[in-house]
Amino acid sequence: MVRHAKSGSRSQWSGDDRLRPLTKKGQKQAEALVDVFEPFPISAVYSSPYLRCVQTVQPLAKALKLPLKQTPSLGEGKGLAGAMQLMGDTKLKRAVLCTHGDIMWELVEELVNRKVARAGEGGYDKGATWVVEVDDGSFVKARYIPAP
C-alpha cells in the first residue's frame, strides 16, 4: 500500500480536490517508486481515482506493462475497509494499492493494534509504502519502506 506522492497544497488548490496533481517533487517520487518495487513480483496496480494517486503509480504500471485499475474503494474518506476488500481478495496477489493519508493512518494503527508492527517503526508520509502480507483477511507481516 502506497500513499500518494507529494501533491500541491490542499489550501492552495481552488479546483476540484480530486483533480489536484502531483508537484515536481511528487513526480520524482512517483518515478522512484519503479525502483522501490523492482524487487517485488507485482501482478496488479490499483489506485484511488484521485489524480494524485493515479499519477503516483502510473510510472510503475507503465514500467511493468500492467493496466492501472482505478477503484473508489481506495478513495479519500473510504476508510480501511475498502482497501481491505482488495487486500483480502484471495485472487489478488502481489498488488500495489495507492491511496490517501487517512487510509494509510488507519492501516498503520491497525498494524500496531494487531501487533504486526510496533508503534513508531514506520509512518505514512507522502510516497511511503507498507508491504503487507495478508492471510485469510488478517495481517500477518508488514514492512515499512520510506518515501523515495
Image (spheres, rainbow, N blue to C red):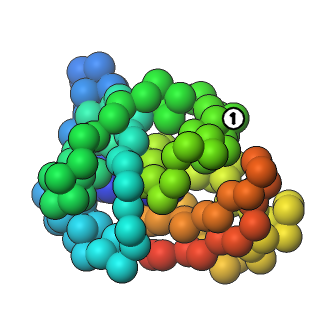
Q: Residue furthest front?
A: 91
Q: Residues within 10 Å of mark 1 (few under 14, many from 20)?
A: some
* 39 sits left or right of 131 in the view: left
Three-letter amino acid code of the residue under disc 1: Ala
Q: Is residue 130 visible?
A: yes
Corner quadrant of residue 64: bottom left
Q: Residue furthest top?
A: 16
**Residue found 48% across the figure and 75% down from its top:** 145
* 139 sits left or right of 103 in the view: right
**Image position, residue 141 (x, y; %):** 70, 71
**Image position, residue 51 (x, y; %):** 26, 34
Where disc 1 sits, the SS reads helix
* 95 sits left or right of 107 in the view: left
**Image position, residue 16 (x, y; %):** 29, 20
- Above or below, 80 against 113 in this view is above
The quadrant in which the C terminus is found is bottom left
Q: Is residue 22 visible?
A: no
**Residue found 54% across the figure and 67% down from its top:** 131
Corner quadrant of residue 132: bottom right
**Residue found 17% across the figure and 53% down from its top:** 65
**Pick the front one: 15 or 142:** 142
**Pick the front one: 47 or 64:** 64
**Residue found 28% across the figure and 51% down from its top:** 57
**Image position, residue 97 (x, y; %):** 45, 48
**Pick the front one: 14 or 91:** 91
**Mark 1 sits on what residue?**
81
The number of callouts visible is 1
